[in-house]
Image: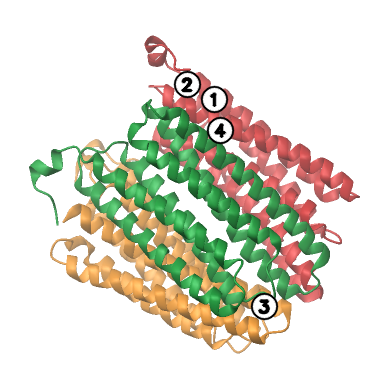
Chain colours: A orange, B green, C red
């Protein structure tokens, strides 16, 4: 599986950018599917959407594995190895958390999902679009630093909005939901969606660190 | 924002110690405020104390960011970069968890908080004082190694006490609280306080590693 | 406590393998005890088994500390320091999570444990045996790469089975358990057991990375 020695000395930067872009596409697809999932009208529909999200999650794992194997086979990388590892790992976490949000919706079958779940799904779609734009700009780090910084700032705002949405949901839940089992279900589902937006913000933080280091 | 080349070669140690001391002050202030929070007599008071803790949390984030930026701009650091990163990161986690404990008290509005919450807050105040003392000793690592080791040992004992308090709280909760929603609320709040003391112990572990490496 | 200079240059590989093997033995013992714990017929029996698991957890912590101290004292290590750190740390996490699963059974005293808890305990015992076999093969990495890869593949299958067991448990729990406090207890206990199998899988992933790097 190893490349020839000559091959290993050639700059392999080009390999990592397309892989990270694929990862951003997977996040975008998963975020779009979780939007469908929170609006599904039947358990069957939830199950079928969850299966699609699960496929994206497998895809994300595969891309991450390819990135790690490439890192071990490549002498020259566009950024420090550890930066690529943490960027790919955190992008994969966003996908994992979207996946486990959908899984909880499927497994718990709550009576209904609150409007906040729909708002969180929309925020995740916004976050996906910022991650995609920042990753597209990454190969041209110096020329696009401002644009990447803008996307990172936006990811930070989205996380803060998601936080607010989750807080208001919790206040409302504890004030109005008297069925303790529904409380457990809904709190668990929306908490996972909120964590996905935290991870999206962390992607932004890692990108900002990369900008500081390399520009 | 970058320093001149000459400046970057100058030992910059002095920068990191004051920043870590500021971080220790933020932990101390947050721990004192969570003590007020668990004793607040009205929801309004909880809200007003939470706002003050939130300010400390922002302050902690800022200090951590400054430390990370300084690390990227400085050639000579007093310890390995990774040690400073993990020390600052874990100190920030202590603040984050105190903040989220207070946030949960505010959002959940439990009927009342058990005595264990007050004991945990006192233990966090003890932990803060040990962290502060160890961080003050840090610039004089060789001369003060025993004193730092003492503080780390104390942080370990505090964590173990916090663990006991949390365990007894849980046993009592499941034996006596029949309202499942109160169980959810109280378990979540005290668990977060107990995690804050775990992070304080981790600060001690990182300090002990630094002592082993550099003395 | 430091070794002489000459001593520090001598290959110390031999130190790490026996320590990792001891850690694998602790995992095996803890996994066997959690099997007893989920089948215990009285609270007294649970308490007595938990104490034994707690002893294993202390043993795991001690071994991990010894490994970290050795790493600081040794110039030549069989693998990258970071690989040894993450391998030992993740093996310790498996023990920690088995310990906290048992602790929850003891503290929560659920009315009864579902069959799924017994199945998860058996899966943890399988995982322990794969970890043990892979760690035994580690000193002969090149000759035993296929055997280690096999154990890692098995750890991955076990995690996937544990996931399925936990999912079916959750569906059943939310369909049939109407006592919300029992829901909280059982979900918390089995979730921790499932997380232990996740960590066992992570041990396998770290081992696979080591194989890629060094063969």
Q: Quadrant of the C terminus of chain B?
A: top left
Provide the residue designation for mark 4.
C64
Q: CA distance from mark 3 to mark 1?
A: 48 Å
The residue shown at (50%, 71%) is B49
Which of pointers 2 and 4 lies earlier in the amino acid sequence?
Answer: 2
Provide the residue designation for mark 2.
C13
What chain letter is assigned to the residue under label 2? C
Q: CA distance from mark 2 to mark 4?
A: 16 Å
Say whether marks 1 and 2 touch (CB < 8 Å): yes
User: Is the same chain shared between marks 2 and 3?
Assistant: no
Residue C215 seen in the current view: no
Say whether marks 1 and 4 touch (CB < 8 Å): no
User: Is the same chain shared between marks 3 and 4?
Assistant: no
Provide the residue designation for mark 3.
A183
What chain letter is assigned to the residue under label 1? C
The residue shown at (64%, 44%) is B160
Q: CA distance from mark 2 to mark 3?
A: 53 Å
């Amino acid at each position: 599986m190893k490349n020839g020695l000559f091959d290993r000395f050639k700059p392999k930067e080009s390999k990592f950018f397309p892989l990270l872009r694929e990862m951003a596409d997977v996040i975008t697809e998963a975020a779009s599917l979780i939007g469908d999932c929170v609006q599904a009208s039947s358990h069957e529909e939830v199950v079928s959407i969850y299966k699609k999200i699960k496929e994206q999650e497998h895809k994300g794992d595969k891309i991450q594995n390819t990135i790690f194997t490439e890192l071990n086979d490549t002498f020259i990388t566009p950024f420090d190895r550890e930066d690529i590892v943490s960027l790919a790992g955190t992008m994969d976490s966003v996908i994992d958390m979207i996946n486990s949000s959908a899984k909880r919706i499927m497994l718990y079958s709550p009576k209904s999902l609150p409007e906040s779940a729909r708002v969180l799904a929309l925020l995740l779609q916004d976050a996906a679009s910022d991650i995609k734009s920042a990753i597209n700009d990454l190969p041209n780090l110096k020329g696009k630093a401002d644009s990447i910084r803008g996307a990172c700032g936006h990811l930070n705002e989205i996380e803060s909005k998601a936080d607010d949405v989750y807080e208001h949901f919790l206040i409302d839940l504890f004030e109005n939901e008297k069925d303790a089992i529904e409380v457990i279900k809904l709190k668990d589902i929306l908490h996972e969606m909120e964590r996905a937006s935290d991870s999206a913000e962390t992607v932004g933080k890692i990108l900002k660190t990369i900008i500081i280091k390399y520009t």
